[in-house]
Amino acid sequence: MGAYAKRGESREEIRKALEAAGVEYLWASFVDIHGAAKVKQVPIAAFDDIIDVGAGFAGGAVWGVNQGPHSHDLMARADVNTFKQLPWHPNTALVHSNLYVDEKPYPSCARVNLLRMIKLFKDEGYQLNGGWEPEHFLVLQNEDGSIRGWDPLGIDNLSKPCYDVRGISQAVDYLQDLMKSCGEVGMFVYQCDHEDANYQYEINWQWEDMLTSSDLCVFFHIMAPQIAKKYGAQVTFMAKPFPDKTGSGNHLHFHVADAKTGENLFTLPDGEKDWKDDRLGYTKLAYYFIGGIMKHKDAICALSSPTVNCYRRIQSGEAVYSSGSQYTWTPAWNSFGDNNRTQMLRSPANNRFEDRSISAMANPYLVTAAYIAAGLDGIKNELDPGEPNIGINVWNIPYEERRKKGMTPLPQNLSEACDALEKDEVVLSALGDIGPEYLRLKREEWSQFMSHVTRWETKRYLTLL
């Protein structure tokens, strides 16, 4: 078992545990606006220094932190409760950090911003809990830059490979190594599987408060590629790396708890009647919270599907049946209902909802901040999410009938999502200083994409007239 900071441990206890485990170096880590981890390595003798002062970074060298080459240093101050010994390099431990500039918390840091939103939610009496489910592909890169799936035995070729025993057996050493590594840093995995696409896998670990869950998600993004290297594979969280296969999501299971008692506020007490449908069993607060999520979902989509490629995953119309396995398993419409994977918000049980729309490329700190703002808007203004869809395949409902039910399509490209975010004061308020820079970078990304001409276009239009 590796060393990691445990709840209730003192600073000195954590230091001694790391030293006893043979840790010699520390990685002070934070994420850029995209959610990509950045680190600076220091000796363990600097343990106190990176907590009290921080490791210095030139912010102009990092995406989306509102700094230039003239700016004062970003100081990454370690959150002492998040030290984790690296399972793949045990003489080193990583710690999640908050950025400071001139001795003040820096609002353009995604983690600092999330802490602001968590405090705002706590002041209202609430805490958001949940767990991320990041899907990913194992791939190999060809000399020309194209990719192929990691399939050393040539057996992962079924049209419906989900849960296939041969497919998972081929990757069992990688998956077990990854699960064991998760356990060594306190991420208690309860299941993993071969997913719906060839070469695609998913790991699920326990729920936590959403700051901890987001930290663990970032750590998983760091760890999985390092474990996969041992087996000659490359991990990608790209939402849609293969046009004919299901894309990768980062599904979020969530509920709101009482900030003081920890009680789950989504579950309807025994004997009370469900406002919407007794088969679901939720409180009004649960419906109001998702009412807020659904009202602001187009804007949230700019964060939860943050790249051009993400929108190849959430296409509506015939595209929901376009993957090699027949289904994409990705919601294209803003809806909620029962335990039904064609919904955007699925009800696995009355203690939580699952948002199935979120891409594997999302920055978990930004999505969580937006969730808190949107959900709180729903609670405060008692936003009605409409009627649940029970036992209905949303993908098969005719377009006009969906409209009558109040279902609207999710944005179909990054530009549409950015338009929605720019108009949404509630979601922008969740981003604070990050919002304008995020929109600038994403508008630039879209513009760069639109400047490229694809082979599909030349094939279709070259001799059309």
Image (cartoon, grey):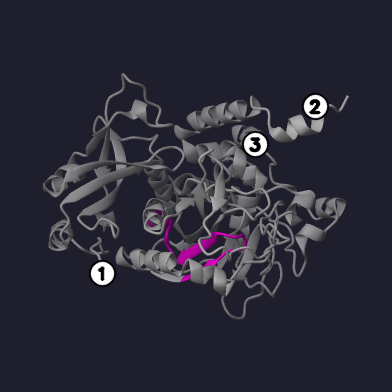
Name the kind of residue labelled 1 in the image.
Met
- The tag earlier along the polypeptide, 2 or 3, is 3
Disc number lying in front (2 or 1): 2
SS state under label 3: helix
Disc 3 versus disc 1: distance between alpha carbons?
A: 46 Å
Name the kind of residue labelled 2 in the image.
Leu
Q: From the viewer's perspective, is 261 left or right of 447? A: left
Name the kind of residue labelled 3 in the image.
Ala
- Residue 366 drawn at (x, y percent): 48, 44
**Image quadrant containing the C terminus:** top right
Give the residue number, with chain letter if any, for mark 1: 1
Disc 2 versus disc 1: distance between alpha carbons?
A: 61 Å
Disc number lying in front (2 or 3): 2
- Residue 69 drawn at (x, y percent): 33, 20
On screen, 439 above or below 373?
A: above
Residue 420 tag number? 3
Q: How crowded is mark 1: few (under 14 residues within 10 Å), some or many (20 or more)?
A: few
203 within the magenta span? yes
The answer to whether the residues at label 2 and label 3 have Cβ atoms under 8 Å apart is no
The residue located at (49%, 50%) in the rendering is 368
Q: Looking at the picture, tell me which residue is in the foreground, 52 or 150.
A: 150
Q: Looking at the picture, tell me which residue is in the foreground, 345 or 332.
A: 332
Q: From the viewer's perspective, is 323 left or right of 309? A: right
Residue 462 tag number? 2
- Residue 203 drawn at (x, y percent): 47, 64
Q: Give the range drawn in magenta.
A: 191-213
SS state under label 1: loop
Residue 280 tag number? none
